Each structure stands twice: as C-alpha cells, then as structure tokens.
Image: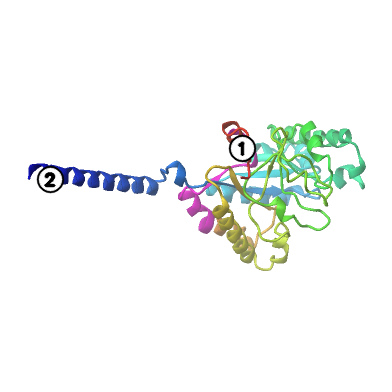
Amino acid sequence: MRRPAKAMISVLILVLVSLAMVACAAADEGNGKHQTDSEQPLLLFSIGMHIEPRATQTMHTQDINAVAGIVEDHGGSMTIQVQTPFTAMLVDNGDSLLADLAGRGHEIALHFHEDAHLGKDSELLPVETWCAVMTQEVDLIKQASGVDVRYWSGGNLYPSILPAAACAGLDVYSDWKSPETQSTPLAMTGVNPWRPAGGTDGDDFSSLTSHDPKGAVTYLPEGLFDRENFASVRKSMKDDEYTYFEYLKDSLLQSLAAAKADRVNVFHFTIHPGEFKGDPADAFAAIDRFLTEVVDPLVESGQIEWATYSQMADAYAQWERENPGVAPRG
C-alpha cells in the first residue's frame, strides 16, 4: 500500500505546483508582467500643435502656454510645430517661448506651408530650392528655441518632399493631409510607423505607403481612423467640442485594439492655438476632460505612454535594430 500512497502524494505535489505556477502567472499579468506570447501592446501617444503662418504672437503665446500646462499636468508633452512669421516675431522680440517649452519637455518642430514660403506651383521647383527654404525655417526655429529640429509636417503634394526634408536635416514626418481636399487616404492610417520609399503628388500613394528599410525618414501614422476627413472633422463639430473628443476617444480605443505587442504603435492628434478653448473661464476644458477621463486611466494601466514625435521615431529605430528585416507593419 505504500507505493500507491507515495504515487498519490507525488501526483498531488505536481498538481499543487502546477496550480501555484498558474497563480503566479496570473499575478504577474495583473502586475503588468507578461510572457512574450501574451505581452500587452503599448501605444505611444502625443498631441501635436500646428502654428499657422498668420499667427499673432500675444494671443497664441497665451493659448500655447495654457494647453502646454494642461498637458504637463497630465504628465505629457507635445510636438509644437512653428514657422515664420510667428518664429520671426519671437526672435525679433527676444521672446523665450519656444526655449521655455523645450525646457519643459516639449518638442519644437516645423510646420511648413509651402505656398507661404515658395509661392504658387511650388511642386515644380527643384529639391535644392525646397531644401534651402526649409533649412532657413529650421535655422530660425533653432535660433528661437535653442534646440535641434527633426520633425516636420507639410509640403504634402511635393513628390520629392522626403529628400528635400532630409537635406534640411529633418527625419520624422507625419500629419499627411491634402491641402486641396482636407482629407487623408485610409491607406495612410494605422498605428505602426514605417520608412516611406518616396513622396506623393496626391494621387499616387504607392511610394509613400511602401516601406524602404534604408529610407532616411520615418513616417508616423496618426492612428486607426474610419474616415478620410478625420484631420478636419473637428471643424464640423466645433459647435460641440465634446462630440469631437468622443470621436477621438473611439479612434484611440480602436487604435489600442489594433496595436501589436511585437511592433511600435503610435497615436497622435493635432490641435491649433485657441482651438477647443470653449468658455474663457474654464479654457480648454474639453482637452483636460479628454486627458482626465480617457488618457490618464490608459497611462495608469500601462497601455499608453506619452512620447513626443521624435521619441516615437527613436522607439521605432530601436525596434528596427532589434528586428532586422522584419516588416514594420506586419
């Protein structure tokens, strides 16, 4: 009778050990410790701000600082994209706005309106001309901020925008939107960055959406959206700011659901100074509410992490080094 008893004890021990391992694994998962097969995807998140060519300094400075303060209160940072004449006004007046923002952790970048700087039919100009003008813009931003500039938005209908930007020292790109239709093809949406093989004239997107492992520029899609006018839809919802942020919430959650544990995943959206200001007595409450009710809990749970656009690109570059030859978008 002893041998069967020993056998039963051995079986019982194995069962107890197995149960303990399952319990430990469950505890690890609850604490954010995941095995490779069940690793929780991470979505890098940020807010971009476009400063338009006709920007006026005083009001914009107040609004930029107000929104930046709200984002900072939530532990985040923005990628603030500027251009002349706004940047020139800061330099001429000795205003340290951009340097102060950079010191607070925000990225300072270029928002390039080609017609404002190159005139009409700018798509017919050579790369050298684009490079020279973009370099002037970048140098002025450096003068105003004291930091290097890596990211730009704009110049979207110039097929040679990638070599022109790279020539100006820029290597991170996003926010593609047709200035003619105010829309973005859904082929440009998603959550995984890539290195475009070329630009687009607004009709043929085959090069822009194709990945070139040796490409000099990283493209950051804005997330998973279900409509081509997602970048301009806020204008149709301006009478009810919270309606837009509900749409943004749905898109963020869809992007999170599409995120992959073995890829770099990103989501970001764009605002302008003074946009979503609402009641002056409670300025930018809609932005604060969105961050409080939607973003903060996802950050707390480890599903979302704040990152500037260049930090997103750096995370992607690190992933590339660790996964040579792997398609970035699966």
Q: Earlier in the sequence, mark 1 or mark 2?
A: 2
**Does the magenta run of residues contain 23?**
no
What residue type is disc 1 on?
Answer: Val
Please give left or right for residue 119 compared with residue 140 in the image.
right
Nearer the camera: disc 1 or disc 2:
2
Front one among 232 and 217: 217
What residue type is disc 2 on?
Answer: Pro
Front one among 237 and 248: 248
Return the x and y of residue 2 as percentages of the image width and height. Answer: 8, 42
Looking at the rendered structure, which numbered label has been put on residue 4? Answer: 2
- Quick check: 227 above or below 192? below
Corner quadrant of residue 181: bottom right
Return the x and y of residue 121 as percentages of the image width and height. Answer: 92, 47
For the residue carrying disc 2, how many other residues have a C-alpha within 10 Å: few (<14), some (14-19), or many (20+)? few
Observer able to see residue 87 = yes
Q: Main secondary structure of the magenta part?
A: helix
> Does dot 2 land on a helix, a strand or a loop?
helix
Return the x and y of residue 264 as percentages of the image width and height. Answer: 58, 42
> Does dot 1 land on a helix, a strand or a loop?
loop
Residue depicted at 45% across the width and 47% down the height: 38
Please give left or right for residue 245 compared with residue 176 in the image.
left
Q: Magenta part of the protein: which range?
A: 292-318
Q: Quadrant of the C terminus?
A: top right
Looking at the rendered structure, which numbered label has been put on residue 326? Answer: 1
- Quick check: 218 above or below 66? above
